[in-house]
Image: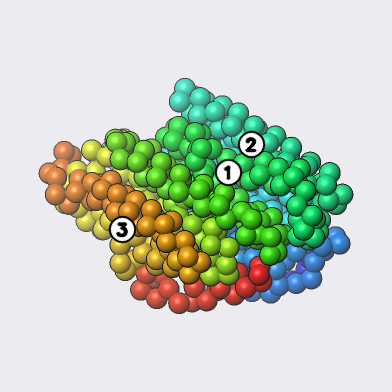
């Protein structure tokens, strides 16, 4: 495998998408999206066969186990997001489809570079390459006032978070006199207060990116207003990228000093779990409900980080994969119902099991996975992060997580009640386009497969986490 092979291949796909979109008929959005999806499938095949390699540019760019794991996750999420986007029918989207897919690919390129970055300047540049296209994509449906407002809010919060993170990184550089993350552990031995302040500010900036409370304010409005296939991807891939940076800085970079962050991360996890679940309960819009649900899941992942152990980091990675299939699948079902019925209200799911039993079953599996019910992927994900925290004696954090998991079942099962108990308000089945149906079935297979046989995924995550400690 040539150095930067995945990134170079993705750049080639971007060039091909650009020229096909430039010289083809603008009304044919499907051709550009299919080209992007096929190109990413080829790159995913390359990524699955790629082995860890030597560091490049003096150690600034690494192709280690963590980088490869993250890149495969990003590619799978983006392929599913593009498959879902191929079903978007708005004429305005068809005319500007090339820009849509190019921005998704540009953001993905930032994620791939970010996963391998072990140098502060490269990390920040890659983060901005990932983030800036997201602001544009959030307001892509610019004829809708809500989309413009959500995009502006996302942009303002995102730029503030970038400024806070850059400010924190400047303190880190000022104290360590280097941008190499490998020097952080040695510098931390001195316990310089400005270095600790820089790391706290950087963590606050990353908190905006992963949507941890109290940095979550952009999430519900953005999720509600943006196109649902994009939101499905946004809810997983950029957040996973944020966690990769946290791994690099606060676990791999800190060494034994990583234990310093346990109280802060545990408090952040607690607040995020409690606030996310409680704010999800009164929602009547299913996209907003899933938005707050996603905030709560970030809290559960932070439980694994608070453990500061190889098993805790591994179970966070396992959780990310389970969350990818469960959350993206739920959003794609929302898109199918919205295309058929024109509604994203929870009331639109009344009698769905009678109208479209297969689609209702898929949604039920996704909700059960998000709720942590045996035996689907989300059950093992929550069990394993709680187990990792309990191994470190954090029983109070496990108790909070377990209690709020029961609370979360209320709003998940409320949707299930609408689907299976309430009488339908509409007649006729929900029409699901083939590509959208394929992406939903892939997510269903992932949720069920990981639930029935989680061992390969757990072993892969443990292998990656072992390199961090």
Q: Nearer the viewer, residue 406 or 189?
A: 189
In this rendering, would 244 be left or right of 380? right
Q: Which residue is drawn at 62% across and 73% down?
A: 466
Q: Kindly identify the residue that appears in the image at 40 percent across and 76 percent down.
A: 453
Q: Determine which residue is flagged by label 3.
A: 368
How far across and how far down the image is residue 222, in percent? 48, 34
The dot on residue 448 is: none
Quote the CA–CA distance across marks 2 and 1.
Answer: 8 Å
Q: Which colour scheme is used?
A: rainbow
| Res 383 → quadrant | bottom left
Secondary structure beneath dot 1 equals helix
| Residue 367 visible in the current orientation | no
Residue 353 placement, left or right of 407: left
Q: Residues within 10 Å of mark 2 (few under 14, many from 20)?
A: many
Q: As rendered, which of 124 and 99 lies closer to the eye?
A: 124
Separation of marks 2 and 3 at Cα, in angstroms: 33 Å
**Residue 134's x, y, as percent?**
59, 39
Q: Residue at x 71, y 72 (%)?
A: 52
Mark 3, secondary structure of its residue: helix
Residue 207: which numbered mark, if any?
1
Which residue is found at the position 51% from the left and 66% from the top? 392
Q: Name the residue under label 2.
A: 161
């Amino acid at each position: 495998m040539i150095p930067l092979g995945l990134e170079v291949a993705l750049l080639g796909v971007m060039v091909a998408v650009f020229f096909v979109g430039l010289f083809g008929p603008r009304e044919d959005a499907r051709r550009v999206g299919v080209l992007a999806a096929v190109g990413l499938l080829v790159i995913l095949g390359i990524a699955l066969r790629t082995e860890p390699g030597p560091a490049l540019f003096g150690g600034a760019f690494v192709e280690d186990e963590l980088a490869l794991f993250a890149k495969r996750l990003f590619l799978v999420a983006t392929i599913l997001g593009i498959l879902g986007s191929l079903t978007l029918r708005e004429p305005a989207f068809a005319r500007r489809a090339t820009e849509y897919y190019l921005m998704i690919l540009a953001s993905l390129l930032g994620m791939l570079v970010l996963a391998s970055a072990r140098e502060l300047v490269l990390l920040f540049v890659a983060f901005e390459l990932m983030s800036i296209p997201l602001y544009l994509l959030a307001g892509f449906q610019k004829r809708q006032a809500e989309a413009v407002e959500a995009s502006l809010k996302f942009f303002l919060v995102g730029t503030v978070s970038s400024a806070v993170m850059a400010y924190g990184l400047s303190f880190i550089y000022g104290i360590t006199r280097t941008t190499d993350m490998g020097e952080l552990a040695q510098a931390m031995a001195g316990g310089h207060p400005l270095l600790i302040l820089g790391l706290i500010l950087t963590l606050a900036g990353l908190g905006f990116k992963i949507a941890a409370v109290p940095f979550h304010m952009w999430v519900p409005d953005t999720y509600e207003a943006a196109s649902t296939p994009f939101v499905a991807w946004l809810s997983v891939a950029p957040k996973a990228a944020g966690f990769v940076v946290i791994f690099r800085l606060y676990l791999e970079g800190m060494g034994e000093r990583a234990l310093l962050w346990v109280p802060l991360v545990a408090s952040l996890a607690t607040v995020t779990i409690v606030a996310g679940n409680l704010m999800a309960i009164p929602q009547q819009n299913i996209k907003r409900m899933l938005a707050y649900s996603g905030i709560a899941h970030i809290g559960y992942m932070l439980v694994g980080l608070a453990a500061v152990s190889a098993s805790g980091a591994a179970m966070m990675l396992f959780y990310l994969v389970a969350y990818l299939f469960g959350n993206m699948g739920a959003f794609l079902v929302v898109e199918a119902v919205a295309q058929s019925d024109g509604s994203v209200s929870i009331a639109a799911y009344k009698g769905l099991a009678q109208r479209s039993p297969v689609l209702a079953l898929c949604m039920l599996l996704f909700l059960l996975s998000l709720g942590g019910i045996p035996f689907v992927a989300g059950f093992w994900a929550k069990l394993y992060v709680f187990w990792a925290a309990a191994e470190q004696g954090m029983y109070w954090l496990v108790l909070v997580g377990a209690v709020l998991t029961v609370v979360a079942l209320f709003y998940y099962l409320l949707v299930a009640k609408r689907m299976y108990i309430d009488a339908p308000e509409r007649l006729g089945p929900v029409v699901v386009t083939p590509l959208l149906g394929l992406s939903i079935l892939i997510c269903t297979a992932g949720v069920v497969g990981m639930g029935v046989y989680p061992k390969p995924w757990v072993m892969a995550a443990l292998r990656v986490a072992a390199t961090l400690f």
